[in-house]
Image (spheres, rainbow, N blue to C red):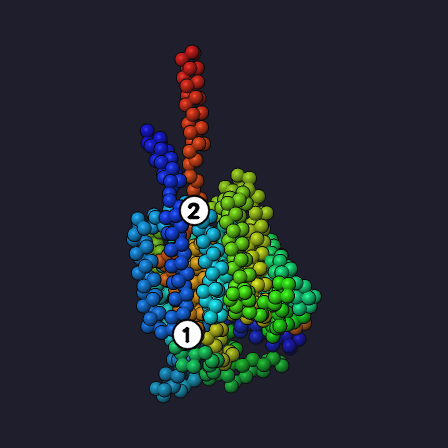
Amino acid sequence: MEGWAQQLINAATIGGMYTLVAIGFTLFFGVLGLINFAHGEVFMLGAFIALFATRALQGFGLTAGWLLVIAMFVIASVCCGVIGMLTERLAFKPVRNSPMLIMLITSLGVSFLLRESVKEFFPEGANPQAFPSPYMAGVVHLGGVVINYTQIALIAISIILVAMLYLLVERTWFGRSMRATAEDRDAARMMGVDIDRVIRNSFFVGSALGGIAGVMNGLYYLSIRFDMGWVMAIKGFTAAVLGGLGNVYGAAVGGYVLALLEVVIVALVPQGSQYKDVFVFLILIVVLVLRPSGIFARSARKAG
Amino acid sequence: MPETDFISAQLADNSAADRRNILYDSIIIGAVLIALGALFVIGMSVERLAIFAGFVAGIAALGVFYARATKLRHVIIGAFSAHPTLAVVLLVVLLAAYPLALSRDPYLIHIGALAAIYVVMALGLNITLGYAGLLDIGFAVYYGAGAYASAQLAIHFGTSVWFGLLAGGLSASFFGYLVAWPALRVHDHYLGLVTLGYGLMMNLLARNLYFLTNGTDGVINIPAPSIGSHIFTEPLNLGWITLPFQANFYYVAVSLALLTAFINYRLGQSKLGRAWDAIREDEIAARCSGVDARSVKILAFSCGAFFGGIGGATYAHMIGYISPENFTFIESITILVMVVLGGAGNIIGVTIGAVALVALPERFREFDHLRLLFFGGALVLLMINRPEGLFPRRRRRRKLQPDKVAALLAQASNELVKATEIAARS
């Protein structure tokens, strides 16, 4: 029983990261009809930018743990948001009205560019990098279940961010114009919505969340690699597909569901950890084929 | 009447084409083909980087010149379209002469063989993506299926490699058949994601199912093919000249590539090819016109996969070693880009795309760590500037056939006369 509780806590931590990445996928798909393979690399960049910022700040003599962590999150999210906007402006905007294959290949190209740039231009970029984690030391015992401070912080951060996203989507002008764009781009334009701005802002929000997930990943695993974005991209869009591509709340739940499924598979299937990713892909295919609008869709309405 | 003007212009054009001088045309065709081959060889063998940069600039200038010089283009295209058979014969002769001319350079012959193998695979994907418009981001699955099937058959059951090639193709088309079933239910993005997930899943399985694939260790000592007593790892002795052993594989691979191109062309012209065109352009309209979209799509996946498997099997026997690293996601993307770069649906374009994407990384081997960086940048630039590929597909066109037109015109005028008579009588 305690083993399961421990696993659930781990699933909640990882699920939070999947969710944040999945929200990006679903936002981009909603406003642009694009499956952005480069989003995984933005996640990876978030971790690397945080690492770079920490090194720089420590160089300036800033050593207080909590300040460093806050700085990591702020700097990484803003930088990733800007990078996301730049990729949109430079790569996706020119191909916005092209067939889907063209956009897909463009996003693959951007993904290669970002990943290889980190590998080439970050010092020692091809090797795994140790990630600083000031909060790792503290541990809470909850009836035999061990939860460290980092996990508590990460679970809290992801829940708070999802709540903020809810407010952003439901209560603000930006959220409303974004929903309108996702529903019907041309109609939204005719109603006076500035499509370019909506897309730009969506890229900022989605990429910033992706960057935050990257920092969380670093704090949790204490090690980051230049090629970790690709795996996360697959997990992220599987989560987004689970929730129904284009459905923001679906993505928020999809991440946790995917993490839970992974935990269950590892626990129940012999040699499960070896085949964990096989099951993720299987889930992806089965959901796409049987429930293309996600597991939470009320009807079998065709998404996209 | 403008219509008759158009028809007579077409007729005049046709008879002009018939009058072309075959000697003159064959010189043009031969010159163009030799020039292309020479460019390839020079590009691959220039050592100094500065000279190579000049070479690239020269090619770019040539390309611009070709795009500008309308008259020259008409002459060249006219020569090729007037005598396609002659062009093919000359091409075959030149391809056969390639190892003879380069018998001192086994590396270039090896690259030629490798390029031919990728041409086979890219033309396979050309069926799925170019003809039927079905996005397949897991094409490396078929490559791997063919390679493993053929290699394991030869190692464990001692079957002939030639049988193995066929078996590889068939087992790959089985894998294509497998993915076709879920793929029938999804479109566009979702189809891309399904095939992507399929590719990743199969690669992971190949890494973990040790009893089938030897896991990440890979399969080693894959036997080379042989004809009679001539084993392919021995130099090819033609009597007056001895070619390095790579030439054996070169000739096999190039023959397969030519055969694949021919089958591709015939399939594109066939009734099935028209059905593929129809579902690519508008699936609903095609269904309404009686196209059985279901079986046509399954056939597209299986046929495409078949050639992927043949290519993979040839590769396995040529290199003698395969592992899951040979058919990763990057490999799928590379084959996909070969098709898109050349222009999906255009056999010549896809061939050029495949040769270029094999030759360029080999050329820049010393910058291998930067390969993906440049690849990514090139992809973005290409998609923004030439989304249809370097050589866009040309729409299917039919020339007016003079005798048929004359018959139709005669028939129409008869009917007109009859109709006037009837009208006059009543």
Mark 2: amino acid: His
Q: Please, is residue B404 above or below residue B142 in the view?
A: above
Q: Earlier in the sequence, mark 1 or mark 2?
A: 2
* Residue hosting label 2: B83
Q: Residue at x 34, y 48 (%)?
A: B75
Q: Residue at x 43, y 63 (%)?
A: B356
Q: Which mark is residue A10?
A: none
Chain letter, disc 2 residue: B
Q: Please, is residue A253 above or below residue B344 in the view?
A: below
Please provide percent x and percent y for residue A39: 44, 66
Q: Residue furthest top?
A: B425
Quarter of the view holding residue A291: bottom right
Please provide percent x and percent y for residue B141: 57, 62
Please provide percent x and percent y for residue B277: 49, 46
Q: Residue furthest front?
A: B240
Q: As rendered, which of B19 and A152 lies closer to the eye?
A: B19
Element under disc 1:
helix
Please provide percent x and percent y for residue B344: 45, 54
Q: Residue at x 69, y 68 (%)?
A: B156
Quarter of the view holding residue B143: bottom right
* Residue hosting label 1: B367
**Quarter the N terminus of chain B occupies:** top left
Chain letter, disc 1 residue: B
Q: As rendered, which of A30 and B417 lies closer to the eye?
A: B417
Q: Are marks 1 and 2 on the same chain?
A: yes
